[in-house]
Image: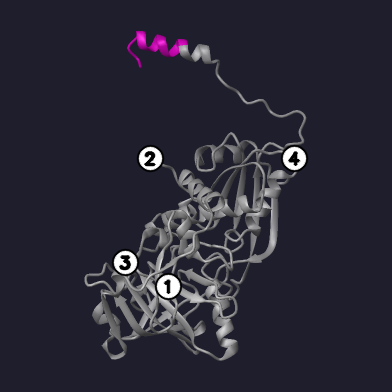
Amino acid sequence: GTSMCEMARWWMKAVTEGGLIKPKEVPSGPVTEVILREDQIDLLRDFPVPKIYPKDGGRYIGTAVYLITRDMETGWVNLGTYRMMVHDRNHTGVQIIKGKHADMHFKQYEKAGKLMPAAAVIGCDPIQFLVSSTLVPAQVSEYDVIGALRGEPVEVFEGELTGLPLPAHAEIILEGFIDPKDLREEGPFGEYTGYYSGKKGEEWPKQVLHVKRIYMRRDPIFCVTTVGKPITDTHMIQSLNRTATLWTDLETMRVPGIRSVFIPPQTTGRFWAIVSLKTMYPGHSIHAGMAVHASSTGHYGMKGVIVVDEDIKADDLDRVWWALSVRYDPWRSTELIKRARSTPLDPALPIDARDIGSKIILDATIPYEWERKPEEIFLDEEMVKRVKERWGELGLD
């Protein structure tokens, strides 16, 4: 089959070489077959909203969901994935983390004293969820990236309430507004780290989507993704889409010599990255590691980067461990960054101090500048061939 690295490389090539494709406006679509307004709306009546873990703060309508918001100044449309807990029949919490793109938009409306138009999409083309749940650079719309991956524009229609571009072929869309003055207790929630989210709901009140419209198909598919200890579908999704966007970042940043990139699902698909590199100058491996931590994908929440030589594929974890054992020296080959952006969901940090964390680069390459490099052992190919033939003669193959 196709490996994660191969799929991520295809993604990177589609975006960097094929070019972004903007969405196409259409009057309506399958998702407008049924439209519920105002008093017709009852989220818990209309949808099988699950409570996944015993200590979750409520029922979560948003796990396989993306939120659509728009920049007040530039018109940039962002699609981002934020968990959503139902409060009552027409209100659902939205955990918009500080510094995320929806948070940038939210702060604009908060400063202006206005309601923020927003829409939550539940059930869509899988590529839409893959792109909306990763880290695309600011001022780039995920719709355009989705178009690049599909090779054709996403069809969107104008929301009758907000004017936002909504995906015409979605299953369910919740349209409404987020009031900057309305923050409510939300959570806890069993997260992708394998732990419940940190601060209690009353310590970290969250934004609320006031649902004014529901668009849906006549028989919609209600989508949920599992979240918990690795490896779940969430971790596989994050491994693929963040590997792809990180590789795209490095290509865009013009870091030379990148052979492959991988963010393993075992690391929750977020916290550690591996880069296979053809070293071309002294310090090249640290350059690559620093670029990962400075990238749109790697700057948020990522803790560590392992850089290996080009003879090891980034997703060959057995050989990555070998490189760490025989090419890495802790004193020479470690770089620490003490103050960097973290995530409020990292259980390795104190609950009250999760804005800032540290990062590390483990350089498991043979130093480029060494004149006397260790000589790797290989069996003689002719001898191996003869031994295999002899085994066949003896019936041992």
Circle 4 residue: 281
Q: Earlier in the sequence, mark 1 or mark 4?
A: 1
Q: Is residue 23 left or right of residue 342?
A: left
Circle 2 residue: 1
Q: What element does badge 4 sit on? A: loop
Could you classify mark 2 by the number of other residues whose Cα lies within 10 Å: few (under 14), some (14-19), or many (20 or more)? few
Circle 1 residue: 83
Q: What element does badge 1 sit on? A: loop
Vertical comparison of 116 with 55: above or below: below
Residue shown at 38% from the left, 82% from the top: 160
Circle 3 residue: 223
The image shows residue 143 at horizontal and vertical percentages of 47, 65
Q: Earlier in the sequence, mark 4 or mark 2?
A: 2
Judged by depth in the image, the label closer to the viewer, 3 or 1, is: 3
Q: Is residue 234 left or right of residue 12?
A: left
Vertical comparison of 133 with 253: above or below: below
Q: What element does badge 3 sit on? A: loop
| Label 3 close to label 4 by CB (< 8 Å) | no
The three-letter code of the residue at mark 2 reads: Gly
What secondary structure characterizes most of the magenta part? Answer: helix
Q: How many marks?
A: 4
The image shows residue 386 at horizontal and vertical percentages of 46, 10
Please tell me the numbered disc located at residue 67: none
Give the distance between the C-alpha atoms of the residues marked 4 and 2, in whole angstroms.
35 Å
Judged by depth in the image, the label closer to the viewer, 2 or 1, is: 2
Q: What element does badge 2 sit on? A: loop
Magenta-span inclusion, residue 388: yes
The three-letter code of the residue at mark 1 reads: Arg
The three-letter code of the residue at mark 4 reads: Tyr
Q: Earlier in the sequence, mark 2 or mark 1?
A: 2
